[in-house]
Image (tube, rainbow, N blue to C red):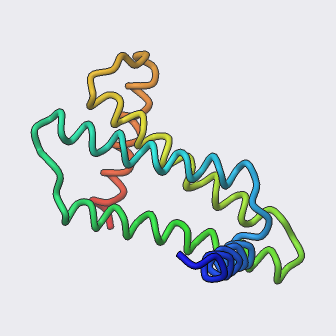
Amino acid sequence: MNQTVFNFASGFFGTVITYAFGTWNELLSFFVIAILIDIISGVTASMKEGKGISSAVGFKGSVKKVFMFVAILLAHRMDVLMSSDFIMTGAIYFYLANELVSIIENYGRLGLPLPPQIKDMITALKRNSDDKQARS
């Protein structure tokens, strides 16, 4: 690849990321790492269970992840608009909690040992979520 094209693409990508999310920080890095671990652990658990990889499930999951970033982008822009710095952070923590729960669920599906308190917490969270969806 031509060096000028690479430099332009890198600069453009960096500008878009900075506009969308502000200064890159450790919380965003941790969030991206959690998403990657969730994807890898989910695919691995699905393969272990003999379900294989479904393009429909993968597409649905990818769309959810994209919209998480869209929500965080909007939260950052609201922070800029209101001269604050807590809306995007709150949005990231919200979605990060969801990713961490999903990772723990995937670990359970993989047969990795989990403390009973964590298993009980995941069961309660899933039950609460299912109850809310049934009422909707």
Q: Nearer the viewer, residue 113 or 16?
A: 16
Residue 59 percent location from the top left of the image = 28, 67
Residue at horizontal 19 percent and vertical 63 percent from the top: 55
Q: Is residue 37 above or below residue 104?
A: below
Residue 48 percent location from the top left of the image = 18, 33
Q: Residue furthest right?
A: 83
Residue at horizontal 48 percent and vertical 51 percent from the top: 35
Residue 70 percent location from the top left of the image = 55, 74
Q: Is residue 93 left or right of residue 132?
A: right
How many numbered circles are shown? Answer: 0
Q: Is residue 9 visible?
A: yes
Residue 6 percent location from the top left of the image = 61, 76
Q: Is residue 75 visible?
A: no
Quadrant for the C terminus in the image = bottom left
Q: Nearer the viewer, residue 40 or 2?
A: 2
Q: Residue furthest front?
A: 2
Residue at horizontal 27 percent and vertical 38 percent from the top: 44
Q: Is residue 57 left or right of residue 7?
A: left
Residue 91 falls in image quadrant: bottom right
Q: Is residue 130 above or below residue 114?
A: below
Residue at horizontal 57 percent and vertical 49 percent from the top: 96
Q: Is residue 91 above or below residue 7?
A: above
Q: Is residue 62 left or right of residue 90?
A: left
